[in-house]
Image (tube, grey):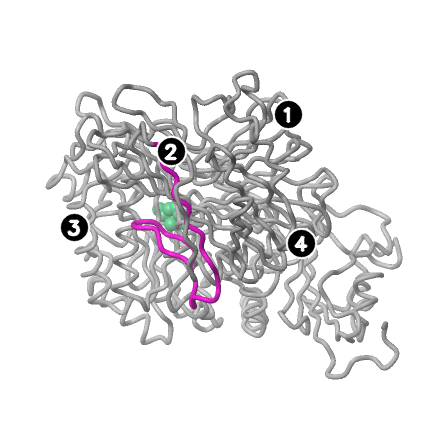
Amino acid sequence: MPITFDSTSRTFHLRNDQISYLMRVLENGTLGHLYFGGSLAESGSYGRLSGGEYLGLSNRLGEPVPFEFPTAGIGDFRVPALTIEQPNGSTALDPRYASHRVFGGKSAIPGLPSTYVQGYDEAETLEILLADTPASLEIRLFYSIYADRAVITRSIRCRNVGSEPLTVRCAMSASLDLPDSDWEMIHLSGAWARERHVRARRLDAGSQSIGSLRGASGHEHNPFLVLKRAHTTEEAGEAFGLSLVYSGNFLAEAEVDQFRTTRVRIGINPDGFAWVLDPGTEFCAPEAVLAYSEAGMGALSDTYHSLYRDRLARGVWRDAPRPIVLNNWEATYFDFDEARLLEIATSARELGVEMFVLDDGWFGRRDSDASSLGDWTANKAKLPGGVEGIARQIEALGLRFGIWIEPEMVNQRSQLFVDHPDWAIGVPTRPRTEGRNQLVLDMARHEVVDYLFGVLSELLGKAPISYVKWDMNRNITEPFSPSLPAARQGEFYHRYILGVYDLYERLTRAFPQVLFESCAGGGGRFDPGILQFAPQGWTSDDTDAVERLRIQWGTSLCYPLSSMAAHVSAVPNHQTGRSTPLATRAGVAFFGVLGYELDPVALTDEERAAVSDQIDYYKARRELFQRGRLVRLRSPFEGGGNETAWMTVSADAKRAVVGHYRVLNGPHRSRERLRLRGLDPKASYRVSVWPAGDDPISAANSGIRGGDELMRLGLVVAPESPSDSRYEGDFTARLFDLEAEATARPNGPA
Ligand code: DGJ
């Protein structure tokens, strides 16, 4: 059994072969944290680690007792996990252990996405009840451990058991006390078109945090934080990950105290948050997923990838091969009619594309971004047969049909706004701020969510739509909902996201055959919460191959290949003006869910042949590119970022594809090597190079190579002869395809 309780020392031990998580009920009933890390023997005596014997002695105030769920006002002067304002205004809280239970499987969180199990034996859950009698508050802490994953999932629920309202001012999903501060904090930060760049900093005294106050997780920071040792690499060393299954305002923070211990916490951002807890009601905080690795960042990512791909994403598209789409956005923007779309789709079909996605501009009178959001009926001037007409014609071509929507938004120039001006978010006494000429609908109101469900159900119900790209192009300003009394306006942001989840839940349940892709001006809401409903997301509006190396590398720290939609677009690139070779654009976009975002009609015959070849190549390896184990080899965030390399490996290590990319070429280079990982050292691999060519690098690598050779000596990634460097050029990509021979080498390594 993964969860045990030693009633003598009152110690909880959650363990599997990879991790242990230990807590102890201290002498005074406070829950102390003992340990989270590599697996420990079940029978050890670990209570001595708690240091909580001194709790309650006034001359020991402020000592770094490791708390499991810290609160304010009782002598722990670090940041709390929970702050509850009580009827007398006090926020002091001292919850004590009351009881616990252990059950097989794991429970869902009402209204919120979370990881799940498919059988009760996949995981076990510990539920601990804490009570604070003076505050009339009960807190339930949930911890789940899977039998074979290096993660602990955590969530909390607070219940008011008194007769007067309480206010939840801060409810972190997880807080973790670590005994030292010798950590580097890794996080994913950026902006529109450069999302999720890897950032690293040494922890230092005080607080260091990332977060969002935008109403969405945002382009700027991602709800994901890693603490790793300075020497931890992709392959070796210790790392903790904290990831929040949530799409709204969040905070992830590490605090180093005066004794150089570290407290790290993650949850809903307390700034702007206040939840009124009426007597008898409960507040549920989102799930936090804590992962641990003592085998480097690569293993930490493996843990998140498989959990989020297989037990967070759900529905028929979770495991199904994802189609190769052609999206018309960069081909036409708003300027199209039915004939033009059919011309593009016909051309795309000839290249091997499987789905045509009609992006923005098909509805209302939408000829620019200034109007019509909210009017989800076809623009008959562009689509005389409506959505149904174009969808059926696309299907007749042998393609599936997908459509773009932005349900949470409204333009002032729209029928929806004329009919329901009060549905747009705004403070009645202030002007509303527009972003991209649009306002945000009040998803905290049930009638708004009901209305959208009705309109979108009609759309999806009457046309053969196989895919929905759900966009969200601005963040929230003037947060306020007339549906909430003044005292409850602090609930607004969270209620907004609950409304988004409710709409996603209802639509995905009603239309299980539809593949949903999330989008928010590119990757502005690319988080685990949305992944539950939309198993893939539009990774970024930036499709430049060089920029994508950084974006996809950073994203891959937490998110699986199957979640990253990656498209090949035209050059000069619409975001950077850069021209990279077509093969390089494809060589980057292959590592994820491939699509095209260009006008296929405008391609030359040579380019069409190349795209057709790319699509064939991808289809033959789709499983590897979408669901293989990603091994990161060379980081675009290190060593000047001129080189990147990664590979995807099948579960049995019999197949792999390595991608090697160089931004700028240099003169007179020779015999540079790239050592691979994750292969079978005893196997012989047939190596072939893509794009196929009569060049020295292809010649140096092609043929049969041992797994040991590929991992210890490596591939050759610069010409043997320095003078051949001149033929390489800038912005290069080479893919190395590895296929194990049926029989192992007779004289391979032991
Ligand atoms: C932002 C998205 O990221 C783009 O791909 C495109 O769908 C536009 N919105 C359309 O307005």
Label 4 element class: strand
- Say if 199 sits above or below 450 in the image: above
Contact (CB < 8 A) between labels 3 and 1? no
**Within 10 Å of the Cα at label 2, are there few (<14), some (14-19), or many (20+) other Cα atoms?**
some
**Residue at image mark 3:** 451
**Residue at image mark 4:** 632
| Residue at horizontal 68 percent and vertical 45 percent from the top | 238
Q: Which label's residue is closer to the chain start, 2 or 1?
A: 1
Where residue 675 appears, x then y in whole percent?
Answer: 78, 58
**Residue at image mark 2:** 214
Question: Cα distance, mark 3 to mark 2?
Answer: 24 Å
Question: Cα distance, mark 3 to mark 4?
Answer: 45 Å
Choose top left, top right, bottom left or bottom right for residue 498. Answer: top left
Q: Which label's residue is closer to the chain start, 4 or 1?
A: 1
Q: Which label's residue is closer to the chain start, 3 or 1?
A: 1
**Within 10 Å of the Cα at label 3, are there few (<14), some (14-19), or many (20+) other Cα atoms?**
few
Where residue 370 appears, x then y in whole percent?
Answer: 27, 39
Q: Magenta includes 120?
A: yes
Q: Mark 2 is on which residue type?
A: Arg
Specify the segment rendered in magenta.
105-132
